[in-house]
Image (spheres, rainbow, N blue to C red):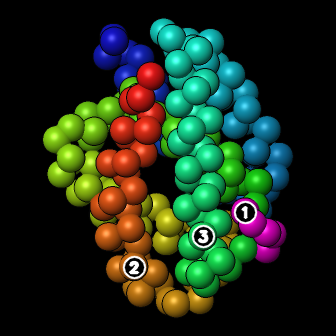
Amino acid sequence: MPSSWLVANALWLQAGWWACVLGAQYPGLLLLVPLGLAIHLWLCPDYKAEIKALLRVALAGCVLDSVLGALGVFSFDTWPLPLWLVLLWWVLASGLRHSLAWAGRPYWRGALLGAFGAPLAYVGGARLAGVGLPLGVIETGLLLMPVWALALPLLLRIAARR
């Protein structure tokens, strides 16, 4: 896979994250996400396998965040998840077979990235998107560390499956 594709995919992940999180307050930004996903699929070398991976990962991610919300880790204004968060799962899924694939093997890479990157993204995103953290910021971050140390490697495997 050309390095330009991986760079473009990494940039898309960042832009998509911002569009989703800020889209919680400015819903017009959410329109950029389906456009970005369509471009991603159009440029993707194997779009059929990519669509399957996107569906599997987004479903698993939405279940994970719905469970965390039901357990009181997050407080959303809609049930089970707000639209911007569902779209954010599609954005994340679009990078797991590409710019984030390096974290899939060995397992510890994904575990480290998940343990440290995900809590920072959640806590930062929650503040920007107006998501409540009933347990507190630090407590939520610490709780998410082991969850995501397990979740990210599993999501990478789910995405890689053919």
Instruction: Tell me residue 119's x, y (percent).
Output: 41, 67
Q: Residues within 10 Å of mark 1 (few under 14, many from 20)?
A: some
For marks 3 and 1, the one nearer the N-term is 3
- Relative vertical location of residue 56 with respect to residue 60 in this rendering, above or below: above
Mark carried by residue 64: none
Instruction: Tell me residue 85's x, y (percent).
Output: 66, 56
- Relative vertical location of residue 79 with respect to residue 108 in this rendering, above or below: below
Q: Quadrant of residue 161?
A: top left
For marks 1 and 2, the one nearer the N-term is 1
- Marker count (numbered): 3
| Residue identifier under label 3 | 67
Q: Nearer the viewer, mark 3 or mark 1?
A: 3
Q: CA distance from mark 1 to mark 2?
A: 19 Å
| Residue identifier under label 2 | 143
Asked whether the beta carbons under mark 3 and mark 1 sit within 8 Å of each other, the answer is: no
| Residue identifier under label 1 | 81
Q: Nearer the viewer, mark 3 or mark 2?
A: 3
Along the line of sight, the residue nearer the viewer: 70 or 6: 70
Residue at 30%, 61% (x, y): give it.
Answer: 149
Q: Secondary structure at mark 1?
A: loop
What amino acid type is highlighted by mark number 1? Leu
Q: Residues within 10 Å of mark 2 (few under 14, many from 20)?
A: some
Q: Residues within 10 Å of mark 3 (few under 14, many from 20)?
A: some
Residue at 63%, 74% (x, y): give it.
Answer: 69
Q: Quadrant of residue 21?
A: bottom right
For the N terminus, which image quadrant? top left
